[in-house]
Image (cartoon, helix red, strand yellow):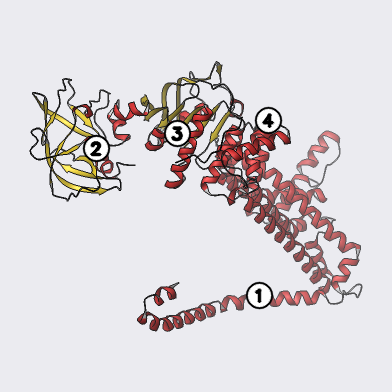
Amino acid sequence: MKSTFATLPQVAHREPVRIRLRQCARTFAGRQGQHTALHPLDLAVEPGETLVLLGPSGCGKTTTLRIISGLEQPDAGGEVWFGDEQVTHLPIEKRDVGMVFQNYALFPNMNVAANIGYGLKIRGYSAEVIRQRTGEMVDMVHLQGLEQRAIHELSGGQKQRVALARAMAVQPRVLLFDEPLAALDAKLRDRLRIDIGQLLRQLGITAVYVTHDQAEAMALGDRIAVMEKGRIAQLGTPQQIYHQPATAFVADFIGTVNRFAILGRGQGSLQVTGGGLPSDYQGDASLLYCRPEDVRICTDDEPVAVRGRVIQRFFLGQSQRLLVDTGAAEPLQVDSSSRQHWQVGDAISLSVPADALFAITGNQTQPHAGEKAESAAGSST
Amino acid sequence: MSQSLLTTGGQPASRAAPSAQARRHHGKWLAHWALAPALAFFLAFWLLPFVQLMVMGAGADSSSGEPGYWAVLTHRQYLFSLLVTVLLSLAVAVLAVVIAAICGCFLARNHFFGRSLLLSMLTFPLAFPGVVVGFLVIMLGGRQGLSAQLGQLLASERWTFAYSLTGLFIGYLYFSIPRVIMTVMAACEKLDTSLEEAARSLGANSWRVIADVLIPGIRPALISTGAICFATSMGAFGTAFTLGTRINVVPMAIYGEFTNYANFAMSAALSVLLGAVTWLALAMARRLSADASLGGA
């Protein structure tokens, strides 16, 4: 899909800045004592990079973003740096950041142009400069003709475009996104995601993007920090996160994984519940993982295979997901072409290419038992 | 709706339609009849007396012999009374809104020890009748009041204000502020905090946030609660009566004409005018706050 954003105006020609967090923790005092939202965290966002903070609600991603923005102060000892400047004690209005909120947070008493020009007005630019810059921003996010509209006359997608333009009009040092697409419907979300991605690449501005949506994270992030319970579980490129998850939590949160308990080792194969897998794995892990799309459906006469029965099938459009009972505690999840006809109860033979099997060396090995059924059904989200 | 569903069903449905329509018609009539007691009540206790009041107001004023309305608008005494009441109520409404807006926003945003106790104390004056409020003002600024004692001590003269316009003003303010605070607090709590955060992220300091986000956000509440304050002050009687002020506010004038002089035409005319002014203020406020909330939706 081609971006709807037009050629970029000369708004973001600032040297991109590096963001560093040093030992930033955040503890909230609640009725039931202290609650640690964020454990001491060290994090660097490279100049011009888009870092996505990804995780379930309550994982500390929003707290991290708010500490970067200045809306939240880290506990004593924490430091926030923008380049060579320490901004820990600088309130948000002096940090020179652009922020985009989930609920748009547009000023309802101002029209589109006044919203976009608000930051410029605060900074004391002349009416002429504001008018010109606002015009450029309107062009960039493709809202021509809507300048005089009231905010309540806009659609959700248009609102978020205004919010984006408003945040960028002041040429901030850093752009911060707090789940900006979560309130939009699926189609619009995809569209705006592509647009934002393109914009971030072209602007080359340092950006931090909070989301709980893994597809959004992978599409937008140069790097992704997967967060869990106030800590970073893994920090890496989308490819690393997906193909070499550091913990079972990361593997489970990003996409879906199958687990194989190793029962024994043979010559060039591993013995697992329901059969065997061709592998010369020599490590000492007792569990190996693979992604559903890497499971291969094979013929019955293949010597080394896992055999089982189809117990459920979900038609997903571009593919279908089969749940295969092999006698193990949880069924295997297998993606196959949506044109193959599988019925519940069919016998099936499966294999996994040796290079698609991976071990997880992180500290948390067991996934949450209760999430098994949900992750099976909602795995493609 | 149900009719269109039925008719799409073909023959049997179209035969069923008239009876369904008849049933609905019947239901409508029943609903109308159910309104009858309310209508009767409205007629008996509102419309009839009010029409009579309006007619009575056109009758001859017993002192001048002119029609009541005409007398009010041509005699300085009554015009002055009306003007003072309007100005006093306006001043009370404006000041109450200003004070209560600040307190209300502060209370909505800050949680501190003793907050809930303070809130319940603030609602206390709502329960007082005007007489008690007047009594409180006398204890504060009357001839034996606190202020008088303080004046005696400091300047050897009794500082009294209870029986002047100041006393009325303070009394009215006293029962107006709690109302406004409660409304402002509710409006302030409903306000989206991310709006303020967005403004701050764009560089706005606290004053700009207040001017650009907070006040526009609670504007509808300020207008409507201010109008209610105005209306309450226009009609307040107990406080004025207790203070026995020299200034004749309209409710006192009505009372005087009615009980002291049995000047029914004049008291009716004054009542109708008082009602009209108040009604006008409320209607204007409704329109204004509707405009404001449309912008704030």
Give the residue displayed 21% in from the left and 28% down from the top. Answer: A357
Front residue of B139 and A270: A270
Q: Which residue is mark 1?
A: B45
What type is the residue that disc 3 sits on? Answer: Val
Q: Which mark is residue A210?
A: 3
Residue A293: percent from left, percent from top: 25, 37
Q: Secondary structure at mark 4?
A: loop
Q: Residues within 10 Å of mark 4 (few under 14, many from 20)?
A: few
Question: In terms of sequence position, does the residue under pointer 2 or pointer 3 come before the other?
Answer: 3
Q: Which residue is mark 4?
A: A123
For discs 3 and 1, the disc positioned in front in the rendered view: 3
Q: Is residue A147 above or below residue B286?
A: above
Asked if labels 3 and 1 share a chain, the reply is no
Give the residue displayed 68% in from the left and 56% down from the top. Answer: B228
Front residue of B214 and B234: B214
Q: Which mark is residue A292?
A: 2
What type is the residue that disc 4 sits on? Answer: Arg
Q: CA distance from mark 3 to mark 1?
A: 62 Å
Query: Can residue A61 be seen in this snapshot?
Result: yes
Asked if labels 1 and 4 share a chain, the reply is no
